[in-house]
Image (cartoon, rainbow, N blue to C red):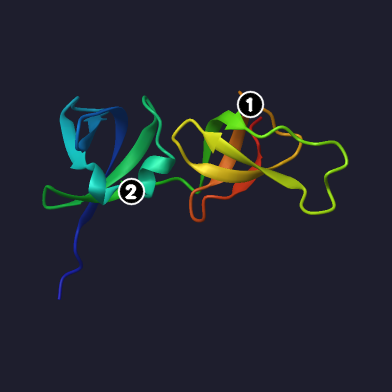
Amino acid sequence: VEPAQIEKREMQYLYDTDDAMVFMDNETYDQVEIPTDRLKWERNFIVPNSNVNISSYEGEILGVILPDKATLKVVECEQAVKGDTATSASKNAVLETGLEVKVPLFINQDEMIVVNTNDGKYSGRAK
């Protein structure tokens, strides 16, 4: 049995159509569309103009390979209430992709944070 030759190509995410995400090959400038229903989890971490690796087998696209961590912007978050650490030291935040995460109280709107792409949890402030 021969091992399957899975190809990985770096591509840039360009934009969404009604039912697909459009990526461009960084070398050939060819564009491919991947149906959004196949990328439900991945789209939480991909922003326009970001580079991702696309895996394929004999020309058929298998999916998107995410990096371990993604840097995303906080577009909305709750206000921290002073002294409100008895229940939990975190608050809800919405990121630019629409992903909702729990963040520490010191994180504010418009800050860049790092999120783990395996579980979607806050990992730290972006440097």
Is 35 on the left or on the right of 76, as rendered?
left
Percent position of residue 12, x then y: 31, 30
Secondary element at image label 1:
loop
Residue at horizontal 41 percent and vertical 46 percent from the top: 66
Q: Nearer the viewer, residue 23 or 41?
A: 41
Is 94 on the left or on the right of 25, as rendered?
right
- Say which residue label 1 marks: 109
Looking at the rendered structure, the kind of residue marked 1 is Gln
Percent position of residue 67, x then y: 45, 45
Percent position of residue 125, x then y: 67, 35
- Say which residue label 2 marks: 40
Residue at horizontal 49 percent and vertical 49 percent from the top: 117
Q: Earlier in the sequence, mark 2 or mark 1?
A: 2
Looking at the rendered structure, the kind of residue marked 2 is Lys
Residue at horizontal 68 percent and vertical 29 percent from the top: 108
Single out the residue that lies furthest toward the right.
Answer: 83
Percent position of residue 83, x then y: 88, 41
Quarter assignment of residue 57: bottom left
Q: Nearer the viewer, residue 124 or 53?
A: 124
In the rendering, which numbered label is found on residue 94?
none
Residue at horizontal 31 percent and vertical 46 percent from the top: 64
Quarter assignment of residue 74: top right
Q: How dense is the environment of label 1, judged by Cα within 10 Å: few (below 14), some, or many (20 and up)? A: some
Q: In which quadrant is the C terminus drawn? A: top right
Q: How dense is the environment of label 2, judged by Cα within 10 Å: few (below 14), some, or many (20 and up)? A: few
